[in-house]
Image: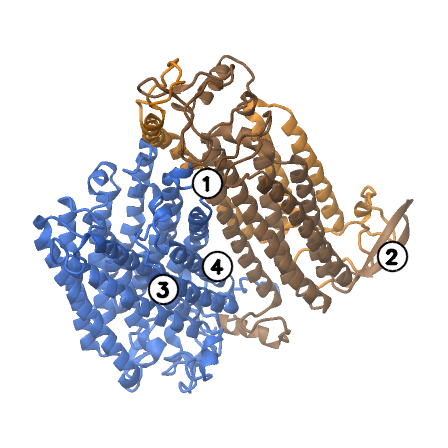
Chain colours: A brown, B blue, C orange
């Protein structure tokens, strides 16, 4: 009968490999610990983003008209392209992890000729392929950030800033430019005779004076009560009409700045994660070039890969939530 | 069938040379600054938390002195009242984020957890050190915020005021953001350590209860703290970029901030109290000379508290425009937390029942914990009740309740743990008589301070006011006197603990007769904790520990007890098939 | 001595597994013995290339699908459709790219547990915000009206009232 103490002596006759930290008994134990650790870390990443998703959900459910209107500012092509780039980079990263697991064994590229015959194109060490694949991943990350930069630049040019600074020069579906005034953003402009003929009935205060609010920024005013446009479109919806809120009337809904706060915060935090991921992959790439990783020890590649996939995961949700609102 | 590794039966544990311990293993500044040893990191955390405890205590004394007279003693003009706001904000923020959250898990936990588990170190020693430096960075940012314009928002940083005030909110909030990550990394490290580094034989239900409560704490740290991170990040963005997520001036929703904040900060009070409960579960059986009563209930109630604790955050927002339905749900769930907490309290009482109580200083603190925590818990039911809370919200009743739980609970639990493990950490015994006197002073001072506040609060004294109606003066004076008594008590504690470092008697390996593994190594423990993998037995079986006059401590005598053996070797958790 | 060919990356369809000397069938999920009898003494599961490539192609197709779906108006279901596709995509990434399918079950518990907490956080907050907003809005509406009165009093072009927005009496209705 074995006592526990005796059973534990057993790792002593293993040689302690260089990569194995002193407080672990086996590479397997070290790997499993690291794996659990990185999953816990990814959990915290998801929860970090969940705050932004929560804010997004609260504002979208309370101001759907804002999101339906403002997403038209975003370029679906760029968004879609970025999604594909990130997915491809996730694929190359997952492949790189596979290569690092196979170590020095060769990876053979073949073309099937049918009947079980193949033409071997070339073969390369998995270790080298791993480095190349991580390089491709980094390049994809850079392309992603480049496209993101083009998008941001376009937004900044149109002064589509978040929150207080939101002051667009042009609006989707609108003829002509809106004057970009520097007056106090809280100022309220009374209605003048130039209101469009098909404009919905205006809101009125208790004394029966009609008013319209200035564009930016204003207090959160909900669907009920004060937003005249919302009331009219709601009524139209109830009557069964197919109404696209906002831009068709040439009059944007209130609180559009909130959409851009969400947009910049979510994509910004995501972008920071992409940059961090790129640097981490670069660091691992340098180590992989030295041939540090093999079947027994590839956890850094694996863990950085997992991190990169979470970055991809977040974007998989951001793309439909921000770009594809219909 | 062999039973117990022989060297454990020797006095002083398996090591013959206590001269070589973790304190003396290496020397010099860098051997500490770059150490990967969990024990040294724990000691550094302990030093830092004790320092900030002192700083926050000074702020508390200023607050209490100010309130001696209805129109204030220190800040007497209307312009200076803002400094009072800064004082209570700094007291709250420092106590919570720099003292209470790291005190038991990061300081005592780091030191004790791996040894108690029978491991050589935590799973990620480098991460552990990194987490300590994050703590230091966060602390420096917080101190900078005091210099650059102390925050006056209250520790809750409610918007829109926190988005508008011109004090150094960004620095303080940035500091707490960093501290949050320190807390997350510690939590991650502990979860992985408990999962993957348990030696053979250390099954889940053979773990000391301190580990269970630390495990539950770590779950909360990992799941809740990231939300605090994003909340504070958004608050910084709100101030810098005026994004308008939380600020109604730009279209945002201040109540959303409260949801975000309390999603973390309510579970955070369980981050603070759960480890102290773990200390209780160690101290009470040891000093009662009895096996803990209802081991599994105590263990699982920790997880219960952790999980239910996530579902009650809305009870901080009852009068803040929360919907009636949700408030009702939250009120109900709040009542549920009482169940696992009460399970613990009853089990500690049952452990003491017919035990042979040994009233050493740790046990005195543990008894104080029981008394105060019960009051704190029961008054919590008042506040959790929806209608009653509308009356008591933002009054001194809340202050008193919070202090009964956080001070009377967490801090006294921490003091119990500090005294309990002090011989293990430093290798020195402190002066027992002075310890008991100090504990008495703290206990009396604490109750004198906060019992009147329940009365004041129910009579309508609002919190966070620099002045008050003369009607409340007798209560405030009493409260302040109590605060001074506590201060004396803690000063005395500091004095004898520091004295013991230099002049204290050498501590035996097991001065209290505890059965958990950390007492099986020398005091202080050696660098690698265990030369041989320790024998894992029932952590609450004291029956085979006998007093040995020659070492002035307890030693294990195997003849006395039913030998503990396992009939099957338990394969290692992780590397089961090698 | 073979790796599964990477034809997909070169634009060819993924070939079916071909038996024979050159290309052994895809190794079973838990075997590391891909190297002709020399077992790879690794610590984790190796995902076959074929699986990775298939998942990648699925992800690309789903991305195109989600774009096409956004062009069709499903009414209320628009968001549900978009999120459903996103959930499928992310599940593929998690299960295959992140090897959760072959991982220790506890890692799945950790991740799913975290998603449950995210769901609780978002749903409880939304549940509330839908209701308290009427309170907040009414108060802010008062403020806005006040401002309007200050600025609009001496405006000659003000139109006659056509409708007065109703106040919201049932504040905090359940």
Whole-percent x and y of residue B548?
A: 29, 82
Q: Mark 2 near mark 3, Cβ–Cβ under 8 Å?
A: no
For label 2, the residue is A122
Q: Which residue is mark 3?
A: B143
Residue B259, picture quadrant: top left
Q: CA distance from mark 2 to mark 1?
A: 58 Å
| Label 2 crowd (10 A; few <14 / some 14-19 / many >=20) | few
Disc 3 on helix, strand or loop? helix
* Residue indicated by mark 1: A164
Q: Work out whether residue A259 or residue B478 is closer to the camera in this orientation and state it.
A: A259
| Left or right side of A24 for B238 | left
- The reply to whether label 3 and label 4 mark residues of one chain is yes
Task: State the image coordinates of residue B431 (x, y, percent, origin top left).
Answer: 22, 79
Pick the residue in front: C84 or A6: C84
Q: Residues within 10 Å of mark 1 (few under 14, many from 20)?
A: many
Q: CA distance from mark 3 to mark 4?
A: 27 Å
Location of mark 4 (residue): B188
Callout 2: helix, strand or loop?
strand
Instruction: Using the image, name the chain to which the residue with label 1 belongs.
Output: A
Secondary structure of the residue carrying tag 4 is helix
Query: Label 4: few (<14), some or many (≥20) within 10 Å?
Result: many
Frontmost of labels 2 and 1 is 1
Name the N-terminal-most of marks 2 and 1: 2
Q: CA distance from mark 4 to mark 1?
A: 38 Å
Q: Earlier in the sequence, mark 3 or mark 4?
A: 3
Please tell me which residue lies in front, B1 or B399.
B399
Mark seen at residue B244:
none
- Distance of label 2 from label 3 (alpha carbons): 61 Å
């Amino acid at each position: 009968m074995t006592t526990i103490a005796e059973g534990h002596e057993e790792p002593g006759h293993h040689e302690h490999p260089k990569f194995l930290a002193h407080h672990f008994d086996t590479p397997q134990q070290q790997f499993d610990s690291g794996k659990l650790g990185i999953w816990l870390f990814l959990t915290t990443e998801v929860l970090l983003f969940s705050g932004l998703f929560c804010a997004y959900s609260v504002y979208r459910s309370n101001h759907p008209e804002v999101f339906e209107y403002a997403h038209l500012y975003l370029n679906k092509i760029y968004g879609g392209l970025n999604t594909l780039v990130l997915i491809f980079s996730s694929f190359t990263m997952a492949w790189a992890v596979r290569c690092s697991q196979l170590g020095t064994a060769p990876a053979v590229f073949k073309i099937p000729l049918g009947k079980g015959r193949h033409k071997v194109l070339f073969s390369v060490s998995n270790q080298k392929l791993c480095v190349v694949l991580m390089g491709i991943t980094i390049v994809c990350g850079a392309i992603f950030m480049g496209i993101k930069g083009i998008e941001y630049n376009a937004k900044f040019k149109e002064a589509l800033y978040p929150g207080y600074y939101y002051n667009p020069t042009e609006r989707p579906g609108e003829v002509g430019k809106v004057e970009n005034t520097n007056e106090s953003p809280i100022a309220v402009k009374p209605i003048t005779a130039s209101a469009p003929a098909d404009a919905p009935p205006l809101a009125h205060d208790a004394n029966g004076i009609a008013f319209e609010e200035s564009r930016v920024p204003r207090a959160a005013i909900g669907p009920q009560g004060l937003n005249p446009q919302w009331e009219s479109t709601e009524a139209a919806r109830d009557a069964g009409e197919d109404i696209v809120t906002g831009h068709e009337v040439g009059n944007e809904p209130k609180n559009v700045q909130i959409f851009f706060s969400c947009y910049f915060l979510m994509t910004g935090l995501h972008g920071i994660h992409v940059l961090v991921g790129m640097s981490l992959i670069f660091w691992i790439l340098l180590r992989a070039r030295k041939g540090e990783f093999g079947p027994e020890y590839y956890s850094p590649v694996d863990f950085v890969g997992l991190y990169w996939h979470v970055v991809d995961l977040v974007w998989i949700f951001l793309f439909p939530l921000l770009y594809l609102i219909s | 069938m062999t039973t117990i590794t022989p060297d454990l039966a020797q006095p002083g544990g398996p090591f013959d040379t206590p001269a070589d311990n973790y304190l003396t293993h290496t020397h010099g500044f860098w051997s500490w600054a770059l150490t990967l040893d969990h024990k040294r990191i724990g000691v550094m955390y302990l030093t830092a938390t004790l320092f900030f405890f002192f700083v926050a205590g000074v702020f508390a004394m200023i607050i209490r002195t100010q309130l001696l007279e209805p129109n204030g003693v220190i800040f007497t003009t209307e312009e200076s009242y803002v400094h009072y706001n800064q004082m209570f904000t700094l007291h709250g923020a420092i106590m919570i984020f720099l003292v209470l959250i790291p005190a038991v898990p990061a300081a005592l936990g780091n030191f004790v957890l791996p040894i108690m588990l029978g491991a050589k170190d935590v799973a990620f020693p480098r991460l552990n050190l990194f987490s300590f430096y994050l703590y230091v960075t966060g602390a420096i940012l917080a101190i900078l915020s005091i210099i650059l314009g102390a925050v006056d928002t209250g520790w809750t940083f409610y918007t829109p005021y926190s988005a508008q005030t011109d004090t150094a909110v960004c620095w303080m909030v940035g500091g707490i953001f960093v501290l949050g990550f320190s807390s997350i990394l510690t939590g991650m490290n502990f979860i992985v350590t408990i999962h993957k580094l348990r030696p053979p034989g250390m099954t889940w239900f053979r773990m000391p209860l301190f580990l269970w409560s630390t495990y539950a704490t770590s779950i909360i740290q990992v799941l809740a703290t990231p939300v605090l991170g994003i909340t504070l990040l958004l608050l910084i963005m709100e101030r810098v970029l005026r994004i308008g997520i939380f600020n109604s001036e730009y279209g945002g929703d201040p109540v959303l901030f409260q949801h975000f904040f309390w999603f973390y900060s309510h579970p955070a009070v369980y981050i603070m109290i759960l480890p102290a409960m773990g200390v209780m579960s160690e101290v009470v059986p040891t000093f009662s000379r009895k096996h803990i009563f209802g081991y599994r209930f105590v263990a699982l109630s920790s997880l219960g508290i952790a999980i239910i604790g996530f579902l009650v955050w809305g009870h901080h927002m009852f009068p803040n425009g929360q919907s009636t339905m949700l408030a009702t749900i939250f009120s109900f769930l709040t009542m549920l937390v009482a169940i696992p907490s009460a399970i613990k309290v009853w089990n500690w009482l049952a452990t003491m029942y017919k035990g042979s109580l040994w009233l050493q200083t740790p046990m005195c603190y543990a008894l104080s914990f029981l008394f105060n925590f019960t009051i704190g818990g029961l008054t919590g039911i008042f506040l959790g009740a929806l209608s009653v809370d509308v009356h008591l919200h933002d009054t001194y009743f809340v202050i008193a309740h919070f202090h009964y739980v956080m001070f009377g609970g967490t801090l006294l639990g921490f003091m119990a743990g500090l005294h309990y493990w002090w011989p293990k950490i430093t290798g020195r015994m402190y002066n027992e008589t002075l310890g008991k006197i100090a504990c008495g002073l703290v206990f009396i001072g604490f109750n004198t301070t906060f019992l009147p506040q329940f009365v004041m609060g129910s009579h309508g004294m609002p919190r966070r006011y620099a002045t008050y109606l003369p009607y409340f003066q007798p209560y405030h004076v009493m409260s302040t006197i109590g605060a001074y008594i506590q201060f004396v008590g803690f000063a005395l504690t500091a004095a004898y603990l520091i004295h013991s470092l230099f002049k204290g008697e050498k501590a035996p390996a097991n001065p209290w007769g505890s059965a958990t593994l950390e007492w099986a190594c020398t005091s202080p423990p050696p660098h690698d904790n265990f030369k041989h993998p320790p024998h894992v037995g029932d952590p609450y079986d004291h029956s085979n520990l006998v007093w040995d006059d020659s070492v002035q401590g307890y030693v294990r005598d195997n003849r006395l007890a039913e030998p503990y053996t396992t009939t099957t070797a338990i394969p290692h958790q992780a590397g089961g098939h090698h | 001595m073979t790796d599964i060919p990477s034809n997909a990356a070169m634009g060819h369809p993924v070939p079916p597994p071909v038996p024979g000397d050159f290309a052994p069938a895809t190794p079973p999920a838990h075997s590391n013995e891909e190297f002709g009898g020399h077992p790879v003494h690794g610590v984790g599961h190796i995902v076959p290339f074929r699986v990775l490539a298939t998942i990648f192609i699925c992800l690309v197709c789903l991305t195109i699908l989600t774009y096409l779906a956004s062009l069709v108006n499903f009414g209320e279901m628009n968001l549900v459709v978009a999120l459903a596709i996103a959930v499928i995509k992310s599940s593929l990434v998690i299960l295959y790219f992140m090897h959760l399918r072959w991982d220790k079950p506890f890692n799945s518990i950790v991740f799913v547990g975290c998603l449950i907490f995210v769901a609780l956080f978002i749903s409880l907050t939304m549940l509330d915000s839908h209701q308290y907003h009427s309170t907040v809005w009414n108060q802010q509406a008062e403020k806005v009206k006040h401002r309007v009165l200050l600025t609009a009093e001496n405006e000659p072009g003000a139109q006659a009232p056509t409708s007065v927005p109703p106040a919201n009496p049932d504040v905090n209705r359940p």
